[in-house]
């Protein structure tokens, strides 16, 4: 999670720079191009890499055979997706009224192959429980991507440079991941693993990921389709802030999946419940202050990061931060289902949520504009999280730490109330947010929550 924090911070430095340098209209074009690229990359980043997390955690004694097989599959598959994307760019670009959009997608295309291999090594290190190596790879990728993009843009390359810097960052992460794996002493086995095992697990994971991540980008695609480019810029700015919880909690899901997979293989139900209770406690314990602080200071945060030009992003942000919080909960619950062998069910639930999002966007975006798109995401993510929550509760029983959730809610309301009274602007806003987060932790301490958490973790 610390590495995800570095990645998120470097990403926000980059996006704030891009938003200020490009302006809303050009920044909106960049945001939509990246949304298309990221959605296509979902085909390559969660199939074999996620299978590596599961199978290496369950059978570490056969690690060398799994890695050898997985690397061949990932390279061939990512190369195929890259070729298909390049060939279909003209067709995808036809739906957008922008003559340069085709060029932008072609420039961005190499990242499909490079980013797919980068994610393969992330999955391998995670499956081997080499979390320190995984953290180093993630942080190196985020910092190098920001540095390459900003450097190229300062040289006058515009949106082209931002897209080139994106795949240069993936290259750095890929190289570091491969180098760190060379230092690992993987067990040698004479048994060769078979494609069928990986394919059987990877295919539903890819389908689940496509439907799940569609919730992150469907709204922006509809904004670009029905509204002016400047609206897409405002929406991209709000979405960039709202996705903070999701990107940080990727670190949580990356450790929960291999840890839960190993525990499930050992058939220790009580240990599984204990892990899940801790996971949910941590999830809500950090989501609650984020919601409280962003909702109360949305206007000030937007102006601090993007200047007053992006003030129309404020109402979008207030809706999206709640929607992304629900989406983050859905991702964590879906990860639990996948680790438990129910990737198909996770796919079905997320596909249903994505279909709800599409229908709501069709109804709300033409009528209510950007706020309609944000509301559609909020409602669709809530529906998905509710259905996934019911499934997980039926499977594992009592895993909700009700007392902890109540304490967190009380601390969150107290923090939000103080934040509404204490208004700061510009640099002093950062001081306010840090102090208010400290106040939230203090209230949890007074209520006894932090003491309980320490006992459980010990």
Image: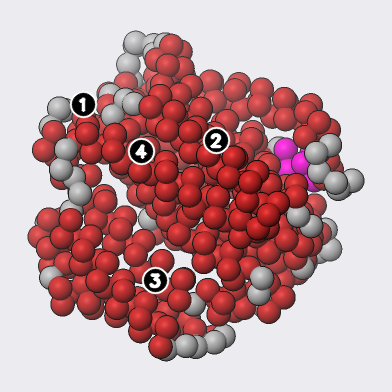
Q: What secondary structure is marked by label 3?
A: helix
The residue drawn where x is 19% and y is 35% is: 396
The residue drawn where x is 23% and y is 60% is: 405
Mark 3 or mark 1: name the one nearer the start of the chain: 1
Q: Is residue 308 left or right of residue 328?
A: right
> Disc 2 to disc 3, how far (Cα)?
29 Å
Q: Quadrant of residue 106?
A: top right
Q: What secondary structure is marked by label 2?
A: helix
Mark 3 and mark 4 residues within 8 Å of each other at the beta carbon: no
> Disc 1 to disc 2, how far (Cα)?
34 Å
Residue hosting label 4: 387
Residue hosting label 3: 292
Mark 4 or mark 1: name the one nearer the start of the chain: 1
Say the numbered circle drawn on residue 265. Answer: 1
Residue hosting label 2: 355
> Disc 4 to disc 1, how far (Cα)?
26 Å
Residue 52 percent coordinates (x, y): 40, 29
Residue interval drawn in magenta: 104-109
């Amino acid at each position: 999670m610390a590495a995800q924090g570095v990645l998120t911070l470097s990403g926000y430095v980059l996006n704030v720079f891009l938003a200020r340098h490009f302006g809303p209209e050009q920044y909106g074009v960049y945001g939509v191009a990246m949304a298309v690229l990221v959605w296509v990359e979902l085909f390559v980043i969660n199939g074999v890499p996620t299978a590596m997390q599961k199978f290496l955690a369950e059978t570490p004694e056969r690690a060398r055979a799994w890695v050898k097989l997985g690397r061949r599959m990932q390279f061939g598959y990512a190369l195929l997706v890259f070729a298909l994307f390049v060939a279909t760019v003209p067709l995808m670009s036809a739906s957008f009224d922008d003559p340069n959009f085709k060029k932008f997608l072609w420039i961005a295309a190499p990242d499909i192959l490079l980013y797919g291999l980068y994610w393969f090594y992330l999955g391998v290190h995670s499956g081997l429980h080499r979390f320190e190596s995984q953290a180093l790879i993630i942080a190196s990728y985020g910092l190098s991507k920001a540095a390459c993009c900003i450097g190229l843009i300062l040289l006058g390359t515009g949106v082209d440079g931002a897209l080139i810097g994106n795949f240069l960052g993936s290259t750095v992460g890929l190289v570091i991941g491969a180098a760190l794996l060379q230092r690992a002493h993987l067990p040698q086995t004479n048994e060769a693993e078979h494609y069928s095992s990986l394919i059987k697990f990877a295919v539903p994971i890819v389908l689940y990921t496509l439907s799940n991540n569609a919730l992150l980008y469907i709204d922006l695609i509809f904004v670009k389709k029905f509204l002016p480019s400047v609206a897409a810029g405002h929406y991209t700015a709000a979405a960039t802030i709202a996705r903070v919880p999701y990107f940080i909690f990727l670190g949580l899901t990356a450790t929960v999946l291999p840890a839960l997979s190993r525990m499930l293989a050992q058939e220790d139900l009580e240990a599984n419940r204990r892990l899940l209770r801790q996971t949910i406690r941590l999830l809500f314990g950090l989501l609650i202050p984020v919601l409280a602080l962003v909702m109360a200071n949305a206007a000030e945060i937007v102006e601090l990061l993007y200047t007053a030009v992006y003030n129309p992003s404020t109402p979008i942000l207030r809706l999206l931060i709640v929607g992304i919080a629900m989406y983050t909960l859905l991702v964590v619950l879906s990860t639990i289902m996948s680790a438990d062998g129910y990737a198909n069910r996770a796919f079905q639930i997320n596909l249903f949520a994505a279909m709800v999002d599409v229908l709501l966007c069709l109804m709300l975006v033409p009528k209510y504009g950007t706020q309609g798109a944000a509301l559609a995401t909020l409602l669709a993510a809530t529906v998905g999280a509710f259905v996934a929550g019911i499934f997980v509760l039926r499977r594992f029983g009592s895993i909700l730490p009700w007392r902890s959730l109540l304490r967190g809610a009380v601390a969150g309301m107290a923090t939000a109330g103080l934040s509404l009274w204490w208004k700061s602007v510009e640099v002093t806003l950062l001081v306010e947010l840090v102090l208010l987060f400290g106040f939230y932790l203090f209230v949890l301490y007074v209520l006894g929550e932090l003491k309980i958490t320490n006992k459980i973790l010990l």
